Amino acid sequence: MREVVVLSGKGGTGKTSIVGAFAALAQHKILADCDVDAADLHLILRPELKEKHEFWSGQTAFIDRGVCTECGLCRDVCRFQAIDNWIVDPVSCEGCGFCYHVCPVQAITMQENLAGHWFLSETRYGPLVHARLDIAQENSGKLVAMVRKQARKVAESEEASYIISDGPPGIGCPVISSLSGTDLALLVTEPSLSGIHDLERILDVCQHFGITTMVCINKYDINEDNTRRIERYCLTQGVEVAARIPFDNVITEAMVHGVPVVDYTDNGVTHELERLWKLVETRLNRKSK
C-alpha cells in the first residue's frame, strides 16, 4: 500500500480537481480529504455518509461561580481578554491554562472541546475519509492525522493498493501532518508569481522531510514564460515536472456538474490527467520494490 498526497502551497491551483480525476482513474484505492479547514472533495465525489465520529481536541477554561471569590487574578493574567464578568468567552480563550494554574481557590477547570467531526463515506469510486473542523477551532493538524490514520485502517481492511489524499494549501501544521510519512507528494502549481513563490516554499518543506516529489503545472498556457521559469527551477532542484495541463473551462463545468473531469469529457485535459496518473502510479510502484 502506497500513499500519495496532492499539495499546492496555495489555494486555487486545481489540486482537488486533480484528486477527483485520480479517484476516477485509479484502481484499488482509498480516498482521503486532508483539507479539514475547507474540505471540498465531496463536491466532486458526492459521497454517501456511512459513519460520523466526534473529534475532541484543545481545552477551554471554565469558572465555577460557586467556588470563585471574584479576586480578579484570572482576568488580570489572561492575555487574550477572554474573561469578562467571571465568564470565559470560548471563542477568545486559547486554552493556555494560565488562569487555571494561578487561581488561588481552584475555581477554574480546563474542559475538552468538541472541535469537529470525521466521516467515513462511500463514493462511486471507493471509500472516502474526510472531516470538518468546527468554527473557531484549532488543532487541524491533529484532525488531519486522524483522517490519515482512519484512511490507513480502511485501506488495510480493504487490501487497497493506494491511498490518495487531497492535502491542505500552504505550508503550516496541517500540511506537515498530511505530508509526513507519505511515499510521494504531487505539487500542483500555476504559472503566476504567487504560484512560483508558494511552489518554492512547499518544495522546501518536502525536501526537509525527505519526501519524493513531482510537479504538475496547471493552466500552463496562461503564461508560458512563467511555465518555463518553473521548469527551470524544478530542473535545478532535481524535481520532475510530470504534467502540463492546459487551461480549459471544461474543468469548471465538471465541478458544477459534480463529477471528475475525466468522467465529464474526453479532450486534451483528460488525456493529460490520464498520463499524469500513469506517471504517479509508476513512481509509486517503483518505490514499493
Image (cartoon, rainbow, N blue to C red):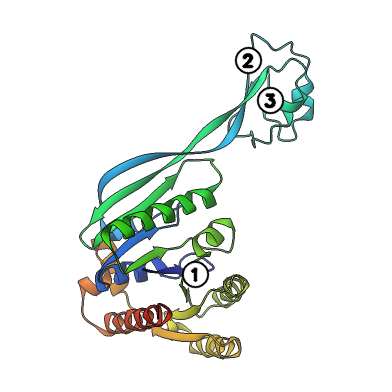
Q: Disc 1 versus disc 2: distance between alpha carbons?
A: 46 Å
Question: Nearer the N terminus, badge 1 or badge 2?
Answer: 1
Placement of the N terminus among the 4 image quadrants:
bottom left
Lower position in the chain sequence, tag 2 or tag 3: 2
Q: Is residue 155 above or below residue 75?
A: below
Residue at image x 51%, y 77%? Answer: 212
Quadrant assignment, res 152:
bottom left
Q: Position of residue 82 (x, y in %)?
A: 67, 30
Q: Decide: marks 2, 3 in contact (CB < 8 A)?
A: no
Residue for point 77% across, 25% down:
102
Q: Is residue 135 above or below residue 274?
A: above
Determine the image quadrant of residue 18.
bottom left
Image height check: is 147 above or below 230?
above
Could you tell me the amino acid type at mark 2? Answer: Asp
Q: Residues within 10 Å of mark 2 (few under 14, many from 20)?
A: some
Pointer 1: what residue? 8
Numbered disc 3: secondary structure:
strand
Q: Position of residue 59 (x, y in %)?
A: 59, 34
Residue 109: give x, y in percent of width and height.
Answer: 63, 23
Q: Residue furthest front?
A: 289
Location of residue 92 by image quarter: top right
Amino acid at pointer 1 = Ser
The one nearer the camera, 286 or 198, is 286
Q: What SS does tag 2 mark?
A: loop
SS under mark 1: loop
Q: Which numbered circle lies on residue 64?
A: 2
Residue hosting label 3: 83
Q: Earlier in the sequence, mark 1 or mark 3?
A: 1
Look at label 3 and name its amino acid. Ile
